[in-house]
Image: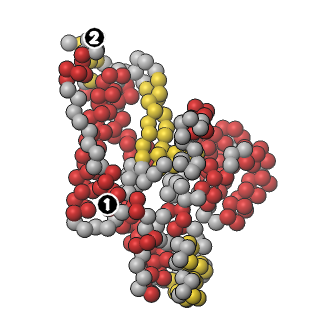
């Protein structure tokens, strides 16, 4: 998937610094060119530098909603404004964002000005043209936490070595599982399968009317059914030929919503064209085809003239200050 998340994590060892982490998202949303980052001036300059080549339509820059919400809170010292901004950022309906923005402006003009200084596509799911695949924050870097566990206390050489070995292990585990999933004939990654199952469950409570088979226009009405907390009674229009639904989910998440699935079920139409190729088993397995190669010992230490440092248990677990053994 072409989503790249960039975030920094502070180092705690003798040399203070920031470990810059860039992660992409795989077909199981674990990993993935849309760049999601905080509003660090260096990243903005790099993304807008024509010589770097990270410009639209080749690359799209989006901001992490969590970072932006947190900065808004610091700027206006108001938790409510932070939460209202987050709600607006996650809205999938244009009129709901308009309502949220109006409400923010009425309560705190300073917050509205702060948000309006950033263009809508940078932070709004609805205005983001689906480039985020529904990913609003850099939080998925947290799935990578085990890779960095305890590593931030280590001297640089040890940090690089430990991280290299852990990333290799991370890739091996996912290579095995994604390859066997593809071999077993599953069409999608586990996460995509579970989203589709959930949407199929909702689709059972929808009714569908066809308006034009030739133009691919269908109207879907939702019903409450036996589901707790579901209101129902909404109407959405699916355009099969343009691959759109008025709920906007197919455009944002690149997967069929329950309305599309209801139409597919009733008229025995395949849902396949609605599932993005990046979200299939084939893409999931292909993410992990490249492998890491071991670093020969002599090469590792040939240029290093200091004492050899071996990380002990306390360093790996990340408790307290690092202790190193000299040999
Ligand atoms: Zn829909």
Total marks drawn?
Answer: 2
Left or right of residue 295, residue 190 in this image: right
User: Residue at the location (30% across, 18% down)?
Assistant: 323
Say which residue label 1 marks: 282
Residue drawn at (60%, 56%) of the image: 128
Asked whether residue 139 appears in the rendered view, the answer is no
Q: Which mark is residue 143?
A: none
Going by the image, does 215 lie left or right of 25?
Answer: right
Q: Quadrant of the C terminus?
A: top left
Q: Position of residue 153 (x, y in %)?
A: 37, 25
Taking the spot 32% from the left edge, 62% from the top edge, the residue there is 281
Secondary structure beneath disc 2?
Answer: loop
Give residue 98's quadrant in the image.
bottom right
Look at mark 2 in the image and give the residue it sits on: 305
| Residues packed near mark 1 inside 10 Å, few (<14), some (14 to 19) or many (20 plus) | many
Tell me residue 118's x, y (percent): 68, 45
| Quarter of the image where the N terminus is located | bottom left
Q: Nearer the viewer, mark 1 or mark 2?
A: 1
Q: Is residue 93 left or right of residue 300?
A: right
- Name the residue furthest front: 51
Q: Is residue 31 visible?
A: yes
């Amino acid at each position: 998937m072409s989503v790249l998340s960039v975030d920094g994590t502070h180092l705690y060892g003798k040399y203070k610094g920031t470990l810059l982490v860039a992660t992409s998202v795989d077909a199981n949303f674990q990993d993935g060119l849309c760049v999601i980052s905080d509003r660090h001036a260096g990243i903005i300059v790099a993304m807008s530098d024509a010589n770097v080549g990270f410009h639209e339509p080749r690359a799209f820059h989006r901001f992490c909603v969590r970072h932006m919400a947190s900065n808004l809170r610091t700027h206006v010292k108001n938790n409510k404004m932070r939460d209202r901004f987050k709600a607006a950022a996650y809205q999938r309906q244009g009129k709901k964002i308009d309502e949220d923005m109006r409400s923010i402006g009425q309560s705190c003009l300073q917050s509205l000005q702060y948000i309006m200084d950033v263009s809508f596509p940078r932070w709004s799911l609805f205005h983001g043209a689906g480039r985020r695949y529904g990913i609003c924050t850099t939080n998925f870097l947290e799935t990578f936490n085990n890779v960095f566990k305890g590593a931030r206390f280590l001297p640089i050489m040890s940090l690089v070595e430990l991280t290299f070995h852990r990333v290799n292990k991370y890739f091996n585990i996912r290579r095995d599982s994604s390859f066997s999933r593809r071999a077993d004939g599953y069409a999608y990654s586990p996460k995509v399968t579970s989203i589709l199952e959930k949407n199929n469950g909702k689709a059972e409570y929808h009714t569908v009317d066809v308006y034009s088979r030739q133009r691919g226009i269908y109207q879907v009405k939702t019903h409450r059914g036996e589901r707790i907390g579901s209101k129902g009674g909404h109407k959405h229009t699916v355009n099969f030929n343009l691959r759109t639904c008025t709920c906007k989910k197919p455009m944002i998440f690149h997967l069929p919503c329950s309305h599309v699935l209801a139409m597919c079920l009733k008229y025995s139409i395949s849902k396949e064209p609605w599932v993005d190729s990046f979200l299939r088993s084939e893409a999931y397995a292909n993410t992990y085809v490249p492998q890491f190669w071991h670093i020969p010992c002599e090469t590792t230490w040939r240029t290093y003239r200091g004492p050899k440092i071996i990380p002990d248990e306390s360093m790996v677990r990340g408790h307290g200050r690092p202790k190193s053994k000299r040999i």
